[in-house]
Image (spheres, rainbow, N blue to C red):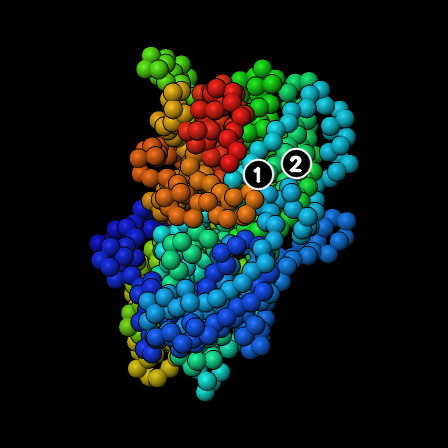
Amino acid sequence: MTAAPRQSLIGVSLPRVEDERFVTGRGLYVADLRIEGAVHAAFVRSPIAHGHIRALNLEAARMAPGVIAAFSGRDLVAGGVLPLPCVRATDSADGTPFWAPVRHAIAVDAVRHGGEAVALIIAESELAAIEAVDLVEADYEELPATIDARQSGERAFDWEKGDRERTEAAFRQAARIVEIEAVNNRVLISPLEPRGAVAAYDAASGQYTLWAPSQGVHLIRRLVAPTLGIELERLRVVTNDVGGSFGAKLVSMPEQTALLFAARVLGRPVRWIASRSENQLTDIAGRDHVMKAQLALDGDARILGLKVETFANLGAYASAIGPSSPTVGFAATMCGPYDFQAVHLTVRARYTNTAPTDAYRGSGKPESIYLLERLVERAARETGLDPIEFRRRNLIPAAKMPYRAANGYVYDSADFSAVMDKALELAGWEDFPARRSVSESRGRRRGRGLGLYLHTTGVTSQEVSRVRLDSAGLVVVETGLQSSGQGHETSLAQLTAERLGIALNEVRIEQGDSTRAETGGPTAGSSSLQVGGITILRATEAMLDKARHRAADHLEALVEDVVYEAGHFRIAGTDRRIHLFTLAKELATRGEDGCAGEAALEGNILTIPNGAYVCEVEVDPATGAVAIDRFVGVDDVGRRLNPQLVEGQVHGGMAQGIGQALHEYVRYDPQTGQMLSGTLMDYCLPRADDLPMFTLDAADLPTGNNMLGMKGAGEIGCIGAPAAVINALADAIGHDRIDMPATPERVWRALNNLPEFQP
């Protein structure tokens, strides 16, 4: 009797294996760690945004009950602590070297943003440390604060991308030039789990250990070790469960270095968990661009060229990879899905007295796609064309794939028109007038908007994956990637189990420890499968090759006669076989090493996921309140490993994009630089009742750039959503002179042609 063929695990929405641990309260987050002998830290933070530290007196705090020590920035410098690095330093187009203010783990002579740490208190209890903060006496000479990059005199760089001469030539030939100015508002990343860390030091070995939530332990180690003046091998970084990141925990933060210093000096583990207000004040922020763009059109409303100028607010300091978001990240998707061959981008990056900015979900791509889609919508209005017709004339035809865009990126597989058409049909685009009439009968204004997007995924990585047999009947996968909610314990196990023909529960994913995988990660840029998945599969093949030799010895056969299928090694043409785990157990019984395979990242990891989002909104003209009535998304992410995981990622990204479009805005007082949105009472995150039921569909074309045919999906929702929402709102109010976030007050003022209120 022939056995039924095994069902493929690819394309199956298997339940997440990690969820049982989470929903039963067995997750292990940094706040759950209980390290024996640990003491508690609290940071003294600057009440001003900019100024000199004239005096700092820690004596009263040091004498407080339960306090063990108090450290200033000068104490850290005297102890050999070095400034935090920026590893994406970017020079100006004219050759002027990149410039950045020195960023200490704790401020030494000056503070540059509200909430910057000026001292560190260590106590036996968290309460004692927090109470001692109020006993620190600090005297500041307050200096003028700048919060707008356009008004800053502190230049990081003026960067350019594209062909200036070709773009200028395109504009000279233009029959029409369309331009727009837009603001991509500063937003807080706001993961559910706040930042935190536990630091320890072993004096006997000189070894440091840092437990911290991250998107990859190896990047954190590469950033933190230099601040301690030590080799990478002397710092172990451990990440357990992570309650969301979206970029907030991607790079190192000053507190990590300060805690490790304190652990070394005191000889005891030091624990710190940020409060929500500390997160609001000091977390890296996202976006914060002021943008101007011009589109050159010929007489048939076809795009000839694009010019963009952006002012990017880096905040008070150059965060580790902060300069990359407004430059290479922004430029990567600047051409979008449109067929033109001349583009030039200028980015003017400036420092202000605000918290630093860095990569936030999408890292530059949501900013450029938002600008481009707003500009395309305006071009349609000014040429008198329907917005669908304007796009149809300018979209890259599928027949042109592979296509080299004007920014140098090669799109290997896409059918932008088919994706758009599917979204329009699913959204009932042609039936919109009837729905608008119903809204008008109720005194509401209704609008519809389209947003097309593409993403350029693939982050350069030093990923090295290891796959080994465990005698307990498991295949153990060691990866430098790190899940912060994506479901890696399911997806990577699914991929491995499929290749080996074994059950999902026979694969264990190990991540989050710099002593396991040699190097790798981080999880970033919607690249987990292209980076980690492909590398894991190659490591699996290496493991199988070694195991095949051991199996041949056991079966007393030639290696070339041994085949592997469905968990067994078998002599071809016979029924003589041995199971993978039986082989591993026999090897262990004889005291021999189990079989392991290792592989480093190779090949092209670029993919071009893309899609079309359609949004419909209703506006109450009396109050300016906006309700999203429907939101339809059609995405091309290539071959889908686990469709349910893809949809979860898209839903979350759409929610963040809608939040930026309608709700979220970091506000600072323009005179003092004080944050005005320092709590969740003042900073509006989208709630469940702010979001519609999303309608999603797929129009997937596999990529040829990797063996899986899969494209990145983690960031696409927040790349495509903002423009769709604001284009719908512009349609409802009758003009597009409105910026994000489109709060009820802003919408009401736009409806009544009133200027925006200036505090």
Quarter of the image with the N terminus is: bottom left
Local SS, label 1: helix
Which of these two is toward me, 305 or 221? 221
Q: Is residue 251 above or below residue 335?
A: below
Q: Earlier in the sequence, mark 2 or mark 1?
A: 2
Q: Quadrant of residue 581?
A: bottom left
Judge from the rendering whether residue 404 lies leftward or rightward of residue 26; answer left or right: right
Local SS, label 2: strand
Q: Residue at x 62, y 62 (%)?
A: 102
- Residue 607: % across, % down: 53, 46
- Residue 81: in sight, yes or no? no
Query: What is the residue that sits farthest to the bottom in this orientation?
Result: 204
Which of these two is toward me, 477 or 229? 229
Q: Residue at x 32, y 15 (%)?
A: 442
Q: Residue at x 49, y 39 (%)?
A: 719
Q: CA distance from mark 2 to mark 1?
A: 9 Å
Q: Residue at x 38, y 74 (%)?
A: 64
Q: Is residue 92 above or below residue 742?
A: below
- Residue 116: in sight, yes or no? yes
- Residue 214: % across, % down: 44, 61
Disc number for residue 487: none
- Residue 672: % across, % down: 55, 47
- Residue 190: % across, % down: 41, 49
Which of these two is toward me, 334 or 106? 106
Pointer 2 residue: 308
Kind of residue at disc 1 = Ser
Pointer 1 residue: 368
Q: Is residue 322 above or below residue 453?
A: below
Q: Assess disc 1: are there few (<14), some (14-19) or many (≥20) residues with their C-alpha within 10 Å of its C-alpha.
A: many
Contact between marks 2 and 1 (CB within 8 A): the answer is: yes
Which of these two is toward me, 390 or 687? 687
Kind of residue at disc 2 = Val
